[in-house]
Image (cartoon, rainbow, N blue to C red):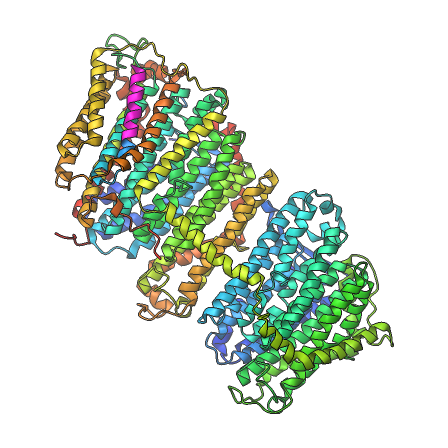
């Protein structure tokens, strides 16, 4: 129950936000930060047990019919992410409260923020893949609301939609994977799957399952070619970017990979696809970041690159690589979260995010500068920051990777150099130099907007200095869960003058070099139009309009508004399906006997039929209303005559009566209507095709039916009981009033309603009559 | 009379009594209203009692006139029927109160108050009929009531739409009657259970297949499946929304219900490869064509009405897969769809009342003006698109699971892809109506949610109630799923039904 | 004779559908009526035809001896005829109202409700 309550608590801000903001509009969001704070404190307590090797699990029955219980699990992996989410949750709550202090929609923002935080907490604590998916989708949904927070802007709305469509697309693949996995393995509980990976590995669909799950992870964690939603999501307010798009949500994909890694990491598909996709994304993101001049875009692309690193490391799958991935998750969260908040401050106070415009902000924004500088140093991997530790172990893992180690190392080096260059730009360039003329006169951000960046970047420093005391014990268990073996994580700040350390220094030097030539690189990129090389995004951008085009085209075709088309389609479908099932059913069609019959003719019967046929032709072809009505009468009376000839006097009488009534009604009501619309012969012939097909099939069915024997049980029963039990000599009447009396009740009801309808049409109108 | 028979006949006759009472109270719409209030509640209560009895006895049968079982007309209620009746009754109650504030003209009110109950009677009868011809009669009661309701008020668009609706339905009834004829010719009975046994002995003969096609087409028109759905988008958006949402939501579901009933009890398709393929294709095309239709529209109500078509496809998908789990998925999806879709229509009606339009171009700014309404819409909209943990997700999940387990991965793929486009088209509404600022020249007639609630109290109340129900089913779906599984098991395992009806 | 009647029924169905496909509103109503005749005859013909022996129990007897006309389809037809009449009456009046409010008798002009608006 304890974990469930924690999850519920993490959602509670969604309900409390309007109330808290009702109490104190100014400090509402800050007050709500108590929720993540409590959760963080709880997580810290739990962490002590986890460090001692404990795992917590609880199961609360929920939807047993689907095998979906509320299974929650706290182990090394989930506690690490939980602390990340709740810790940053506190900072972001405080930050957002200040950032949005003048915004009337602030309470709503915190509703969505709490919804998001709750979903993330639920996601990492889920002990079953299906439950994880439930929260997974909720993060997409709440992210949609948060990206579209400035919903008056069309661009915000479009970006929100794009982010959601891409991640939900991935989610659907993932759902298919989960369903398939559940069907094959017989369970979706993570503890059972981890305890017995063979359940999954024995499945014949194992590779399909993996690819489907990876689609979820790749879209969420913005891997190439699904990355494009992330830079566009920068339309969101800064706290959203800092929280969702750098520290937590985009890492959900990484979390998923880490979660399932013990099951899949031995598969060749895993060890080739992940490093390939992750590695490419890493380099691609770094290069695109270098081409950008909008600070938020720069951060977004470096985030994509960093996510690529994590995916790559998990794919390499050695002990060291997994450890490196987890260390990097923490390091990246600390510096990237800071930088997003820093950029938020700059945007908020200076009114622009263009690196070329910004300079000399150090004096106006001293505290923001401190945070930025600390984070930038961590990002570039300078001693003694935690980023340095991460970079060292990253190089170690790359050098140690089982295949393609030189290529991997080179790729990491390129990304590292770009990171270093951009760190210099963000941490140094925009704060030093001349004070530029900016849209707003810059000044320091309020306290609430400084706390977050300062604390987060401070931890980046602390994590480096105290790496053995703080980071190591936590991440040790985290990586062990991911790798599912007991291995020792050794994190130290200082390894001595190793080759790797040399590489680190070289990276910084190269970074400086890239920094120097960055303007020229960007100029080349602009000339070659490289930053507009949207690639996969253009596929998305073309897909939506073409989807709409197809949709409109087919809708125009099917929903043409012409009754004629509808009827043709319906009757053709009937005829076609009958042909299909008759052809594929058992037993052959008695073509030869179809027209054979020993039921003779009488001249008067034939006469009636001929009269009806003549009337039929006339009613179709005649342009005279009188002729048509008379022919209609002939057909009606003819039918009645046939009933009379073949032993159905009651039916015949009714038919006579009704026919007369209908014709009278017809003449009374419709006689004043204009002449028939003239239709050219060509069109008429064309319309005859479906009609004749339909008629032919109906006649054919009747003839075919005559070849089979009908059971007479019902007929005999009525004959036996009509007089004996129901005291009626006329069996048809007895059936109507007795055996099937309920039908007659319904029939009378229909007549009554129709009468009401006629009354309604004739008498009741609130609309003026056109023309008269 | 035995208790079971008493409640079964009352659930059918209560609406008739209400209609007749209201006919006598013509001209006094206040009194009619109260009769209506009383009877919608009574009907729901009795439906609940029927539901309770089927849970206890699995099946109750009413042999009208006490003739030998299978020779007279039989009414039979199993878990499936009872669930459908209860659902229809609940919806009828909500739509009744929702329509409170819609009509102004006295004579329209008087007519509505009568015909509404005839409609309810037709619905109830259709869900109970164990006899094909009796089903036809209830269908006609239902249809002619819907004709009258659709034309209430007599606006031009309503008349136009209804004319097509009448023509298509006359054709549908023609096909239905022919189907009944063929079944009688083949088996000598029109009782579903008896016909089922007789058809079994014929094997999968071609003529039996042909007979089944008539029902497929006729019921398919009612259910609005591809390529027979045309009446729905042509008519739906023309009538007053309280009426159209009730009629269309339930008309299509009656269609789905009879498809399930017929193609399990009378003519089981689970072993019939040709029919399975036909149903698979119908399901896939219905989903795709419907959702494309929705994506193409730019009118609040038209988007929603095409979604109905698309979602019928999911239910047919369950029938096509044919395992008990799949049919349970279809049934749960049906419940979900009725609740969520109706709520969305009701919300569109509210928006229309305050903003005076259904056109996405002219609407906007609802989130800023009425955040609570936006929340209520968002819950239903995301439930519709199958975002967990809302109702639509459970339905989608069960169907996907059943599909994979039966090896029908093609249809599962289609259904998942369609759900993405569904999401896309729903965000279109969210974008245009709720997020986008109110366009120049448009305005709201009231300025806050509480004013809206004061002007349209029962409409707002109904929408809120439905939202609570949707949330309830979303978070506690277990009982509903279990019920659906039991109902599905019962129809797939047809012998119990057949034996109960024929008293064997 | 049963073969001839089956073909006649088929022709009635064909004519009914053909008229429904017609542009003219009046033709549409005639089509609806034609489909009604076709349905009745179809139901009548699914049972074995019997010439001239209605299902009437002789006054002296309790039951009736075969052959006699199958009463079941007859009962069904009777119900169907009456229901069909109700629907036709409504349709006729509806048609009139549609004409009065649109001033057109051309079905092709009635496509405003379901056309896709751009």
- Asked whether, in this view, residue A260 is left or right of residue B123, the answer is right
Percent x, y of residue A68: 61, 50
Residue B138, can we see it?
A: no
Image quarter hosting the N terminus of chain B:
top left
Percent x, y of residue A735: 30, 22
Count of numbered marks: 0
Residue A47, can we see it?
A: yes
Q: Is residue A73 magenta?
A: no
What's the magenta bit mostly, secondary-structure-wise?
helix
- Relative to residue A381, is residue A219 depicted above or below? above
Which image quarter: residue B190? top left
Q: Residue at x 55, y 68 (%)?
A: A232
Residue nearest the observer in this picture, A409 or B327: A409
Residue nearest the observer in this picture, A27 or B367: B367
Q: Is residue C12 magenta?
A: yes
Percent x, y of residue A371: 66, 83
Q: Residue at x 83, y 61 (%)?
A: A487
- Asked whether, in this view, residue A104 is left or right of residue A268, the answer is left
Q: Residue at x 80, y 60 (%)?
A: A318
Residue nearest the observer in this picture, A131 or B307: B307
| Extent of the magenta region | C1-15
- Asked whether, in this view, residue A180 is left or right of residue B418, the answer is right
Which image quarter: residue A278? bottom right
- Asked whether, in this view, residue B124 is left or right of residue B287, the answer is left
- Relative to residue A683, is residue A297 depicted above or below? below
Percent x, y of residue A282: 69, 66
């Amino acid at each position: 129950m304890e974990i469930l309550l924690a999850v519920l608590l993490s959602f509670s801000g969604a309900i409390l936000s309007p109330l808290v903001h009702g109490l104190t509009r100014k400090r509402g969001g800050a007050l709500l930060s108590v929720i993540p704070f409590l959760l963080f404190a709880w997580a810290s307590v739990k962490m002590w047990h986890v460090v001692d090797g404990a795992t917590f699990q609880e199961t609360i029955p929920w939807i047993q019919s689907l095998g979906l219980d509320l299974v929650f699990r706290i182990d090394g992996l989930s506690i690490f992410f939980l602390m990340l989410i709740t810790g940053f949750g506190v900072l972001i709550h405080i930050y957002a409260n200040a950032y949005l202090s003048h915004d009337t929609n602030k309470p709503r923002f915190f509703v969505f923020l709490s919804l998001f935080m709750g979903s993330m907490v639920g996601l990492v604590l889920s002990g079953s893949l299906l439950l994880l998916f439930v929260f997974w989708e909720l993060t997409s949904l709440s992210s949609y609301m948060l990206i579209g927070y400035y919903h008056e802007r069309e661009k915000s709305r479009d970006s929100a939609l794009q982010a959601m469509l891409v991640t939900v697309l991935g989610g659907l693949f993932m759902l298919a994977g989960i369903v398939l996995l559940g069907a094959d393995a017989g369970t979706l509980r993570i503890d059972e799957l981890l305890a017995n990976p063979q359940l999954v590995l024995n499945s014949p669909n194992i590779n399909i399952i993996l690819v489907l799950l990876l689609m979820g992870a790749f879209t969420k964690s913005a891997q190439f070619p699904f990355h494009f939603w992330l830079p566009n999501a920068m339309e969101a307010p800064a706290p959203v970017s800092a929280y969702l798009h750098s520290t937590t949500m985009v890492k959900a994909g990484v979390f998923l990979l880490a979660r399932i890694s013990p099951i899949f990491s031995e598969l060749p598909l895993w060890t080739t696809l992940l490093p390939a996709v992750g590695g490419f994304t890493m380099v691609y993101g770094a290069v695109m970041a270098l081409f950008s001049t909008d600070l938020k875009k720069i951060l977004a692309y470096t985030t994509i690159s960093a996510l690529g690193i994590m995916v790559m490391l998990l794919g390499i799958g050695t002990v060291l690589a997994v450890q490196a991935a987890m260390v990097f998750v923490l390091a990246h969260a600390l510096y990237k979260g800071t930088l997003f908040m820093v950029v938020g401050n700059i945007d908020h106070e200076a009114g622009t995010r263009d690196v070329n415009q910004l300079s000399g902000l150090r004096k106006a924004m001293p505290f923001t500068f401190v945070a930025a500088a600390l984070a930038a140093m961590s990002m570039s991997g300078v001693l003694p920051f935690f980023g340095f530790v991460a970079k060292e172990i990253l190089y170690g893992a790359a050098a140690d990777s089982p295949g393609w180690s030189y290529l991997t190392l080179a790729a990491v080096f390129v990304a590292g150099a770009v990171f270093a260059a951009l760190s210099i730009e963000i941490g140094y360039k925009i704060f030093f130099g001349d004070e530029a003329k900016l849209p707003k006169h810059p000044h320091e951000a309020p306290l609430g907007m400084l706390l977050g960046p300062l604390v987060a970047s401070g931890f980046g420093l602390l994590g480096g200095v105290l790496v053995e005391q703080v980071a190591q014990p936590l991440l040790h268990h985290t990586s062990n869960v991911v790798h599912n073996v007991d291995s020792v994580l050794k994190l130290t700040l200082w390894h001595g003058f190793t080759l790797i350390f040399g590489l680190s220094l070289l990276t910084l030097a190269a970074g400086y070099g890239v920094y120097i030539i960055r303007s020229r690189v960007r100029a080349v990129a602009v000339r070659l139009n490289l930053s507009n090389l949207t690639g996969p995004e253009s596929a998305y951008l073309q897909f939506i309009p073409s989807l709409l085009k197809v949709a409109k085209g087919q809708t125009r075709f099917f929903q043409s508004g012409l009754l004629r088309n509808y009827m043709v389609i319906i009757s053709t479908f009937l005829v076609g399906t009958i042909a299909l099932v008759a052809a594929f059913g058992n037993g052959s069609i008695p073509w030869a006997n179809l027209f054979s019959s020993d039921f003779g003719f009488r001249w008067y019967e034939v006469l009636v039929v001929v009269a009806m046929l003549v009337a039929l032709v006339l009613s179709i072809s005649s342009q005279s209303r009188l002729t048509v009505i008379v022919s209609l009468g002939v057909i009606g009376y003819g039918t009645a005559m046939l009933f009379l000839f073949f032993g159905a006097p009651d039916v015949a009488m009714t038919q006579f009566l009704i026919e007369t009534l209908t014709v009278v009604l017809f003449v009374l009501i419709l006689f004043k209507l204009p002449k028939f619309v003239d239709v050219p012969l060509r069109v008429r012939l064309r319309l005859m095709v479906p009609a004749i097909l339909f008629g032919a099939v109906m006649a054919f069915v009747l003839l075919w039916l005559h070849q089979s024997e009908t059971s007479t049980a019902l007929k005999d029963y009525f004959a036996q009981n009509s007089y004996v039990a129901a005291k009626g000599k006329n069996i048809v009447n007895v059936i109507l009033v007795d055996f099937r009396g309920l039908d007659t009740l319904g029939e009378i009801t229909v007549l009554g309603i129709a009468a009401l309808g006629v009354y309604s049409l004739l008498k009741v109108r609130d609309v003026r009559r056109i023309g008269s | 009379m035995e208790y079971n028979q008493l409640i079964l006949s009352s659930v059918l006759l209560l609406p008739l009594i209400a209609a007749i009472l209201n006919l006598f109270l013509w001209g006094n719409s206040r009194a009619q209203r109260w009769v209506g209030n009383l009877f919608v509640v009574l009907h729901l209560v009795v439906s609940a009692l029927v539901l309770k009895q089927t849970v206890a006895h699995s099946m109750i049968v009413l042999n009208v006139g006490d003739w030998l079982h299978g020779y007279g007309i039989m009414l039979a209620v199993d878990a499936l029927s009872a669930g459908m009746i209860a659902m229809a009754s609940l919806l009828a109650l909500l739509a009744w109160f929702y329509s409170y504030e819609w009509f102004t003209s006295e004579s329209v009110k008087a007519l509505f108050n009568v015909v509404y109950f005839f409609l309810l009677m037709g619905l109830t009868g259709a869900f109970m009929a164990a006899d094909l011809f009796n089903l036809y009669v209830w269908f006609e009661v239902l249809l002619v009531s819907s004709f009258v309701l659709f034309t209430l008020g007599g606006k031009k668009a309503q008349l136009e739409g209804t004319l097509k609706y009448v023509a298509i339905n006359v054709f549908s009834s023609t096909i239905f009657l022919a189907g009944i004829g063929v079944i009688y010719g083949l088996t000598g009975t029109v009782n579903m259970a008896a016909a089922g046994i007789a058809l079994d002995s014929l094997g999968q003969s071609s003529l039996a297949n042909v007979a089944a096609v008539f029902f497929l087409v006729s019921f398919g028109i009612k259910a609005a499946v591809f390529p027979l759905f045309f009446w729905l988008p042509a008519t739906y958006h023309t009538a007053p929304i309280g009426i159209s949402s009730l009629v269309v939501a339930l008309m299509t579901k009656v269609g789905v219900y009879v498809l399930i009933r017929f193609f399990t009890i009378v003519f089981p398709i689970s072993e019939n490869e040709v029919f399975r393929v036909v149903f698979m294709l119908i399901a896939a095309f219905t989903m795709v064509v419907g959702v494309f239709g929705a994506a193409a529209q730019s009118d609040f109500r038209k988007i929603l009405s095409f979604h109905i078509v698309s979602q019928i496809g999911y239910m047919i998908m369950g029938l096509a897969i044919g395992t008990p789990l799949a049919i349970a998925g279809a049934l749960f999806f049906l419940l979900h769809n009725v609740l969520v879709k109706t709520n969305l229509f009701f919300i569109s009606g509210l928006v229309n009342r305050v903003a005076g339009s259904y056109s996405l171009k002219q609407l906007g700014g609802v989130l800023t003006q009425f955040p609570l309404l936006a929340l209520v819409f968002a819950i239903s909209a995301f439930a519709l698109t199958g975002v967990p943990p809302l109702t639509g997700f459970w339905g989608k999940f069960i169907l996907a699971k059943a599909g994979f387990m039966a090896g029908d991965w093609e249809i599962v793929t289609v259904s998942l892809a369609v759900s993405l486009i569904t999401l896309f088209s729903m965000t279109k509404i969210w974008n245009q109506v709720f997020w986008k600022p109110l366009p120049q020249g448009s305005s709201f007639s009231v300025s806050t949610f509480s004013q809206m609630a004061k002007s349209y109290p029962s409409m707002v109340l109904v929408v809120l109630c439905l939202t609570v129900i949707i949330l309830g089913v979303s978070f506690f779906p277990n009982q509903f799923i279990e019920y659906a599984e039991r109902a599905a098991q019962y129809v797939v395992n047809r012998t119990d039904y057949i034996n109960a009806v024929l008293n064997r | 004779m049963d073969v001839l009647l089956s073909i006649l029924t088929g022709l009635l169905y064909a004519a009914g559908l053909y008229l429904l496909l017609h542009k003219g509103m009046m033709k549409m109503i005639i089509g609806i009526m034609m489909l009604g005749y076709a349905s009745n005859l179809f139901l009548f013909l699914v049972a074995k035809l019997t010439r001239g022996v209605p299902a009437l129990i002789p006054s002296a007897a309790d039951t009736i001896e075969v052959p006699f006309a199958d009463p079941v389809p007859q009962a069904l037809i009777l119900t169907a005829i009456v229901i069909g009449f109700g629907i036709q009456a409504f349709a006729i009046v509806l048609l009139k109202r549609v004409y009065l409010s649109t001033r057109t008798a051309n079905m092709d002009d009635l496509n405003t409700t379901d056309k896709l608006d751009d």
